[in-house]
Image (tube, rainbow, N blue to C red):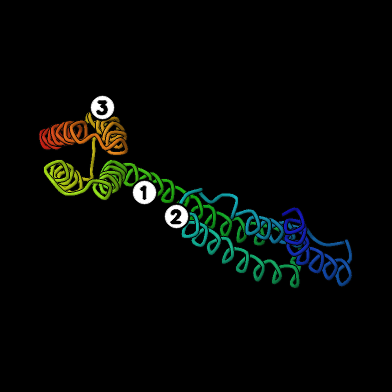
């Protein structure tokens, strides 16, 4: 992994080395302020493009978020490089035009980047909330299905199947005020799994009945909270 990081660092440095080599060999070190302003902004744009991946919000949507932010930084660098090189070649004595133009470009970039980062935060939070809401139905259904596969036919199996059908079809959207009931469902699922592993049909039937009551109570309270 360290070798990969070193290789990436070398790759990033290639542009800086080549650009500075050409800049100093062809132009020397004596330049008007407009050239140095352009020189600074080109380097700033490049550094931002390289560092943008570190600004990406972690999570399942990181690839999507990263692509959007990286695209914005890449476009900014391309635009800034073109504008900066033009000012370097023209080398006007006055610095105001170079400063104003490149500050405006940087400001547009900052607004676009920050707006996307804020949007990503909201999107990431919404995705995390949706995943949390899915947890009750997905995990409970999966665990009940596993128990159903362990139990052979009969009245007990029908009770577990009833609990599965009820929870599987329950509302995904949840509320913190029913969190205690959901926690009780998970606890009861643990007892159900242990009873099924021990082939204790009576205990399995009792746990399945409790799950039905808990699931119905959760769904009832969610309807009242809507």
Q: Which residue is mark 3?
A: 180
Image location (x, y in percent) of residue 117: 48, 50
Image location (x, y in percent) of residue 81: 67, 67
Residue 80 in the figure: left or right of residue 221: right
Q: Is residue 70 above or below residue 118?
A: below
Q: Which residue is mark 1?
A: 127
Q: Image quadrant of residue 207?
A: top left
Q: Image quadrant of residue 20?
A: bottom right
Q: Is residue 199 above or below residue 121?
A: above
Residue name at image x 73 percent, y 59 percent: 4
Q: Image quadrant of residue 98?
A: bottom right
Q: CA distance from mark 1 to mark 3?
A: 22 Å
Residue 193 in the figure: left or right of residue 74: left
Question: Where is the C terminus found, in terms of image quarters?
Answer: top left
Is there any visible trace of residue 8 in the rendered image? yes
For label 3, count other residues whose C-alpha is less than 10 Å away and answer few (under 14), some (14-19) or many (20+).
Answer: few
Image location (x, y in percent) of residue 204: 21, 35
* Res 61 label: 2
């Amino acid at each position: 992994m360290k070798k990969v990081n070193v290789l990436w660092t070398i790759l990033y440095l290639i542009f800086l080395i080549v650009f500075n080599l050409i800049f100093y060999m062809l132009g020397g070190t004596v330049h008007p302020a407009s050239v140095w302003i352009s020189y600074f902004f080109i380097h700033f744009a490049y550094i931002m493009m390289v560092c943008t991946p570190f600004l990406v919000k972690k999570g399942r949507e990181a690839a999507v978020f990263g692509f959007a932010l990286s695209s914005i930084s890449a476009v900014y660098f391309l635009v800034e490089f073109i504008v900066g090189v033009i000012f370097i070649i023209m080398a006007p004595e006055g610095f105001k035009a170079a400063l104003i133009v490149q500050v405006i470009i940087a400001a547009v970039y900052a607004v676009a980047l920050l707006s996307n980062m804020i949007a990503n935060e909201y999107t990431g939070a919404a995705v995390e909330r949706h995943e949390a809401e899915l947890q009750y139905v997905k995990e409970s259904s999966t665990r009940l299905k596993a128990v159903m596969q362990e139990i052979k036919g009969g009245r007990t199996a029908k009770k577990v199947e009833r609990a599965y059908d009820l929870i599987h079809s329950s509302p995904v959207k949840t509320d913190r005020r029913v969190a205690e009931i959901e926690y009780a469902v998970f606890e009861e699922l643990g007892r159900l799994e242990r009873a099924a592993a021990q082939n204790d049909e009576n205990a399995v039937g009792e746990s399945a009945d409790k799950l039905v009551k808990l699931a119905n109570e959760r769904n009832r309270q969610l309807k009242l909270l809507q």
